[in-house]
Image (cartoon, helix red, strand yellow):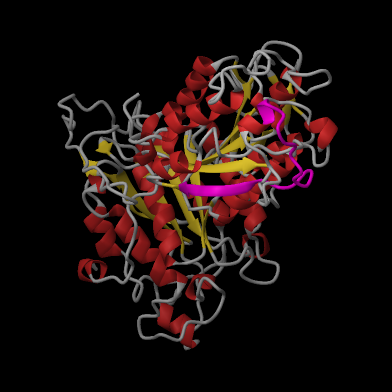
Amino acid sequence: MISRILLGSLALPLLAVSLAASCGGNGGSSGSASSNATASGGSGGTGADPGVGGFIAAGGSGGGEPAVCDPPDVLVVLDRTLTMHKTPEGGTPNDGPDYKSSKWFQAITAIEQLVAPPLDKGIRFGVELWPKDPGGGTCITLAERVLDTKQATNPTCQEGEVLISPGLDQGTAIQALLDPATTTLCTTTPTGNALLTAEQHLQEIAAAGREQYVVLVTDGADWDQSCPDPNPLPIAQALMKKGIRTYIVGFSATGDIQPGGVGAEFLNNMACAGGTAKGFPAPCADDGNGNFTATDPTGTSLYLKAGNATELALALKSIGGKLCCNCGDTCDPPEILIALDRTLTMHKTPNGDTPADGPDYPSSKWYQAVTAIEKMVAPPRDKHARYGLELWPRDPGGETCITLAERVTNAKQATNPFCESGEIVVPPALGSGAAIQQYLDPATTRICISTPTGEALFTATDHLLKSVTPGRDQYVVLVTDGADWDQSCPDPSPLPIVQQLAASGIRTFVVGFSAEGAIQPGGVGAAFLNDMACAGQTAKGFPAGCQEGPGGFVAKDPNGEVLYLQASDAAGLDKALSGVADGLCCDCVK
């Protein structure tokens, strides 16, 4: 199969990886793989290319330090059921004899690319196919299924079969085993039994101190109809309690690939049960016994969703880079959207005074916020995170918003429409620091009337959910003085929007910039920001100071200790934003 892989048509980006796994940053989605090396062994990226990750041979690292990690056991559990003959869109492929448009061909190709050397020196790969093929021609080939020349007659609801046990340097063996043309497909969908097979095998080979993972690759269809017992969900939950996390890779262009088939809701619950949901544990609920399910199973995808061959390869590569032991430069820089409050109160000093240091007014919150953000996104940081900028509310033009000097001197009044949405002025991207710095200027970037904090977060939500990349983490950094949204733009309330972002795996850092909790009489201050930090699941010591309600997290005591990132002066704001940047930096030495 190697020649087919080398000549394969997929032009794949490099390993897409969640940041915390390789960097130990805040709020990553895997919650493990801390052994991955950082900033060593790989070639640096340029421009939009983050660079090719390098494998560091056992016993050493790119920096001359001894290797400290033990490559984990990773068992790829591949769905070989009959629906895998279809295309990701649910159609019957017509590109024989290879049927490259089928999910089966694309899944095998992506797995062979995942396990190929040198990654198989940093991960102990194994493969399980399910259900097992009992032989005797009872399972059928891809071509037989597509052309309907033969029916599968294997026994229903059988267990899976581990054909290659996890071990080092198994990539070539797995590639030799799998062939889309000859590796057979079988009837019924015993997802639960497949996971029981994986659990039994991994426990048999478990070694002290070595992490173990299941990677379930499935189109999610009809287990509940053909093989409802055992239910896969409690098995994934049990695996998690035993320290075995399960990655869920859902391969289908639609949530349900057939009428009544099990789709996105099931896979979201499974991703939470396996402890690998996007932003875990933010979008998941614990029943009190360590059993996780999705807070909103019908919401955005928490599993690794792949709707085509390229997305499937990215999803699998993201797992590989995340778990690889002694690998360098492998993580996928996260998207960090800075949502900057440009409302009129930002003209004041952090103490609430009118600045008197014109013409630049460096004592104003606006000047200090713009300056701090420019420092946060400056190279080389923008090579290790995809920074973007939203200003809120939007400036509709026509000089309806006003300059800092016009506001301070009261030379002109803002007349922009009230309570409008924010505007994404620089989308999250690598190397965006210069663009953000060029866009922002304290003297000319205008400030506007009304405080539509909720609308701003809706704008951020809409943009980020439309730009999801499998395996890539996303964050919002809300920089605000916290004032008067409840008076000027109370609808929509920001709190449930941040809770919903968290339920979608997108965490929100809340940076409150003011020397006082409330900067004006009746203004919204520390209590609101504490609730927001808990809702965004980035509160200090989270979840200790927070409690979960029907919609998500809020502060146990909103009027208690500060849980958000509090900045009372320029130095404090620099420190808060730098802390976020350094914590989320991809492939940075911590």
State the image quarter where residue 136 is shown. bottom left
Image quadrant where one finds the N terminus: bottom left
* On screen, residue 81 above or below 486: below
* On screen, residue 188 above or below 240: below
Image quadrant where one finds the C terminus: top left
* On screen, residue 514 above or below 214: above
Residue 134 appears in the picture as rendered: no
The one of 223 and 482 positioned closer to us in this rendering: 482
The one of 27 and 559 positioned closer to us in this rendering: 559
Q: In this view, does 384 lie to the left or right of 281?
A: left
Residue 135 location, x and y as percent? 39, 70
State the image quarter where residue 555 is shown. top right
Q: What's the magenta region?
A: 407-428
Number of marks present in the image shown: 0
Residue at image coords 76%, 13%:
559
The residue positioned farthest toward the top in the image shown = 561
The one of 49 and 191 positioned closer to us in this rendering: 49
Residue 587 appears in the picture as rendered: yes
State the image quarter where residue 39 is shown. top left
Magenta stretch: helix, strand or loop mostly: loop
Residue 548 location, x and y as percent? 73, 28
Residue 48 location, x and y as percent? 34, 51
Q: Is residue 460 covered in magenta?
A: no
Residue at image coords 49%, 27%:
372
Q: Is residue 410 covered in magenta?
A: yes
Residue 244 location, x and y as percent? 47, 37
